Amino acid sequence: MEILLHRTIQSGALVYRVIRRIGVALVAATFPAAAVAQPAGYPAKPIRVIAPFPAGGPVEVLTRVFTTRLHESMGQPFVIENRAGASGTIGTEFVAKAPRDGYTMLVHNCAYSSNVSFYKKLPFDPVTDFAPITQLDVTSGNLLVLHPSVPARSVKELIALAKARPGQLNYASAGVGSPQHVTAALFASMAGIQLTHVAYKGNPPAFADVVGGHIELMFVSPSVGRPYAQSGRLRGLGIAGPKRLPSLPDVPTVMETGLAGYNVTCWHGMWFPAGVPTEIVRRMNAEIVKALDTPEVRKYLAEADYFPVGNSPEEFAEFIRKDIAHQAGVAKTLGIQPSADA
């Protein structure tokens, strides 16, 4: 998740050991020098793709769009498995311990980087236990949605209401350290208000409780929240990212409403467990980048307000290194204490 602030943020001690060794370990783990040659005819069987969030959420929907294209180009099924929990760490751990044969992949979002700072100890090392394949996209930023029962019709009115009722307004998220959590926590911090965080095990149940009026507000993917904002079932108050969306031209950015410097986006990427032969990593990278150029994928990304990336494994590894350090600074700025071990 990219978060632009006016001041420089220093990384906390919590992730120092990870960051210190990233420069050497990341590339070494991604492209082991002793990797064996690519098995002939790869892929020769179905490939498992682990989505570490509940079925029906934005990560799984995005994954299905890509795996359909990969099935067509590589001739083998890509079977999606949802292993949700702990802001994606349960499914991520599963991939970290999977065989290094190129038949198990991970699809994750920016919580991959922020989880380092939101949990005291992860059951895997995000640097050394994975081989980055490519960054799929960068998002436009989440949409702030509010249940109509709340007497606020703009970001300014919401902030005023929260100041009058400190701690009485609740926001939902897909879990501690999730994009929804960090986006809302930074919003509250920069606005000088107190909101109560209610963490769920994934985006669908969190959003369902906002729609049902059990939780007052949430920062959610525009593709999820847009139909509800357009129908009036929820109020769309602001976009967390840097510019308005063509699909929601009347919804301003949060920055436009007066919260200067607030600019929060996320991203999605794909990984193998570390130790997968370099030739397989590069083959998969080439196939995913090719999929990014298909009309079907481009159409989906445009409709979801995602912007395609498709970088190299080395570029993605460097991006992760910087994002882990960046997220440590964000957690320090927000004063968020790490929760129990994942």
Image: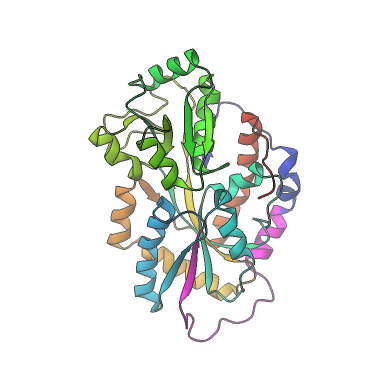
Identified at 34% across, 27% down, the residue is 252
User: Is 249 left, or right, of 204 in this rendering?
Assistant: left
Identified at 49% across, 56% down, the residue is 269
- Residue 115 vs residue 272, the one in the foreground: 115
- Where does residue 9 sit, x and y in percent of width and height? 64, 32
Tell me if residue 18 comes above or below residue 253 in the rendering: below
- Residue 55 vs residue 74, the one in the foreground: 55
Can residue 4 be seen?
no
Q: Is residue 230 magenta?
A: no
The tally of labels here is 0
- Where does residue 233 sit, x and y in percent of width and height? 28, 34
Q: Name the residue furthest left.
A: 231
- Where does residue 294 sit, x and y in percent of width and height? 31, 63
Can residue 195 be seen?
yes
Identified at 31% across, 37% down, the residue is 245
Tell me if residue 52 comes above or below residue 32 in the rendering: above
- Residue 89 vs residue 17, the one in the foreground: 89
Q: Is residue 31 magenta?
A: yes
Q: Name the residue furthest top.
A: 164
User: Is 29 left, or right, of 301 in this rendering?
Assistant: right
- Where does residue 98 sit, x and y in percent of width and height? 61, 70
- Residue 338 vs residue 282, the one in the foreground: 338
Identified at 55% across, 56% down, the residue is 316
Q: Name the residue furthest bottom.
A: 40
Tell me if residue 266 comes above or below residue 8 in the rendering: below
Instruction: Please report the bounds of the magenta region as a residue range.
Output: 22-51
